[in-house]
């Protein structure tokens, strides 16, 4: 067992509000020191990002806005020519969305649960995350919404599936419904039009819970495989590589045989996955490591090769070595460079393919990315939904905003934080899960 907190920390913990203020003051002081005498770094984004030199931090930057939610009539800001409305409201941390063939919309409601507290920074982290509505009691359910009158609002609501363990990813293959719980993949029988599942599930694959807890799912185009994103336990294998076995990877499950294996590794926290349809290539968004600076290294969007290794924890953005990590030169030599940088600590989580013309003003094919937003840099980043245009199967230009305005101008409050994104019913709208606003937003062309 670890030693109990000192008396000083007991006093501080006894007053959560005071502790939060102390944390904010310490964080603000650290941020001011880091920013002293230097201009803000430009975002490390795009095909050829300018990634600054790493500056390892003995005390990590900790800055998160207080969760505020949306006042009546207050909406996210759309790109020109678009409009947004609440498709579903009064949720409890909606994280991921799946649209069934009959246009029913499933929403996974789950939340990170507080882990063990071992250090003063752990206390600071948990206190800050509670204030930001980023940790707490998880609803552990999937809700179903049905828009019976086609007015863009899911007025019929049922609990589709409950008593899960931090459900996240969802997939339907034939008459089987798959759920990515934090501790594994579970299969349930599904009947078209059903508004709930009461049958017991069958666990097919075990994953280690804790750490980066989300388990995204994506079926292969032919329905023969199911891919799952599994994030690392820690930032840079802080507790050794043995406890990270099977993590920081995308797994693939063969539906017929039931066998599962690691498809690609060295991906610190791969969350959203999507297929680029012209090349049938798998793409993912990855959250990179902390504690090296505001823009070091950038989160990224990348194609994923079978058997590919993408650097974590030994190196980043190709073969840039992280000197904080005990090194393995043979692994560094194998590391593949990602395709497209998304900026430092943007927490890019959601990902879906959006065909050209789905939304007015977006006349190219491309990927939509839900950027949940940073907690560990001096100037906040993310907190928006962006579009990355593609040409000939690859990113071709700078990202453009679809939705913004989730963050107050002074960065003190977040009205919402976008997570999962998917093309909505009818194929002419975009759905966005907002786990601070507790809303699923529907983006369409303006009337």
Image (cartoon, grey):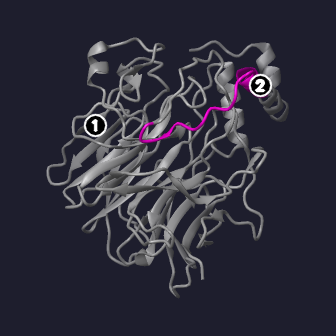
Q: Quadrant of residue 447?
A: bottom right
Q: Residues within 10 Å of mark 2 (few under 14, many from 20)?
A: few
Q: Which residues are magenta?
A: 26-48
Against 50, is 189 above or below?
Answer: below
Q: Is residue 264 left or right of residue 139?
A: left
Seen at 48% across and 71% down, the residue is 359
Secondary structure type for disc 1: strand
- For residue 313, say whether it is visible: no
Q: Give me the residue at 45% from left, 30% from top.
A: 233
Q: Quadrant of residue 58?
A: top right
Q: Nearer the viewer, residue 437 or 366?
A: 366
Determine which residue is flagged by label 1: 264
Measured as percent of width and height from the top left, residue 377 is found at 65, 32
Q: Say above or below: 392 vs 80.
A: above
Residue 32: numbered disc: 2
- Give percent across and percent down for residue 124: 70, 28
Which circle, 2 or 1, is nearer the viewer? 2
């Amino acid at each position: 067992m670890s030693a109990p907190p000192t008396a000083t920390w007991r006093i501080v913990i006894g007053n959560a509000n005071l502790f939060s203020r102390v944390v904010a003051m310490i964080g603000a002081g650290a941020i001011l020191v880091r920013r002293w005498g230097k201009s803000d770094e430009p975002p490390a984004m795009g095909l050829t990002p300018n990634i600054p030199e790493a500056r390892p931090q003995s005390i990590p930057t900790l800055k998160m806005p207080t969760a505020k939610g949306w006042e009546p009539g207050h909406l996210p800001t759309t790109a020109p020519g678009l409009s947004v409305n609440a498709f579903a409201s009064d949720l409890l941390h909606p994280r991921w969305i799946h649209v069934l063939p009959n246009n029913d919309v499933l929403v996974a409601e789950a939340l990170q649960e507080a882990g063990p507290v071992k250090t003063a920074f752990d206390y600071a982290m948990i206190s800050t995350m509670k204030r930001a509505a980023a940790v707490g009691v998880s609803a552990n359910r999937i809700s179903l919404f049905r828009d019976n009158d086609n007015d863009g609002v899911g007025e019929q609501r049922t609990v589709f599936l409950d008593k899960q363990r931090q459900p996240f990813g969802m997939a339907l293959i034939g008459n089987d419904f798959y759920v990515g719980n934090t501790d594994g993949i579970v299969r349930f029988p599904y009947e078209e039009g059903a508004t709930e599942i009461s049958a017991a599930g069958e666990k097919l694959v075990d994953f280690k819970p804790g750490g980066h807890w989300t388990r995204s799912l994506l079926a292969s185009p032919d329905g023969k495989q199911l891919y799952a994103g599994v994030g690392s336990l820690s930032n840079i294998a802080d507790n050794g590589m043995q406890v990270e076995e099977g993590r920081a990877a995308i797994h693939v499950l063969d539906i017929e045989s039931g066998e599962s294996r690691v498809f690609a590794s060295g991906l610190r926290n791969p969350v959203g996955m999507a297929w680029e349809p012209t090349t049938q290539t798998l793409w993912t968004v990855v959250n990179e490591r902390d504690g090296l600076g505001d823009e070091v290294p950038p989160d990224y969007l990348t194609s994923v090769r079978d058997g590919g290794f993408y650097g974590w924890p030994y190196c980043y953005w190709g073969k840039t070595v992280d000197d904080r990590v005990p090194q393995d030169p043979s692994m560094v030599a194998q590391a593949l460079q990602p395709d497209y940088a998304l900026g430092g600590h943007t927490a890019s989580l959601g990902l879906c393919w959006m065909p050209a013309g789905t939304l007015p003003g977006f006349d190219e094919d491309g990927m939509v990315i839900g950027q949940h937003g940073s907690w560990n840099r001096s100037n906040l980043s993310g907190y928006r939904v962006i579009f990355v245009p593609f040409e000939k199967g690859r990113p071709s230009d700078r990202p453009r905003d679809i939705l913004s305005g989730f963050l107050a101008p002074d960065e003190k409050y977040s009205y919402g934080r976008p997570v999962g994104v998917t093309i909505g019913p009818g194929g002419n709208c975009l759905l966005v899960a907002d786990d601070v606003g507790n809303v699923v937003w529907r983006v369409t062309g303006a009337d």
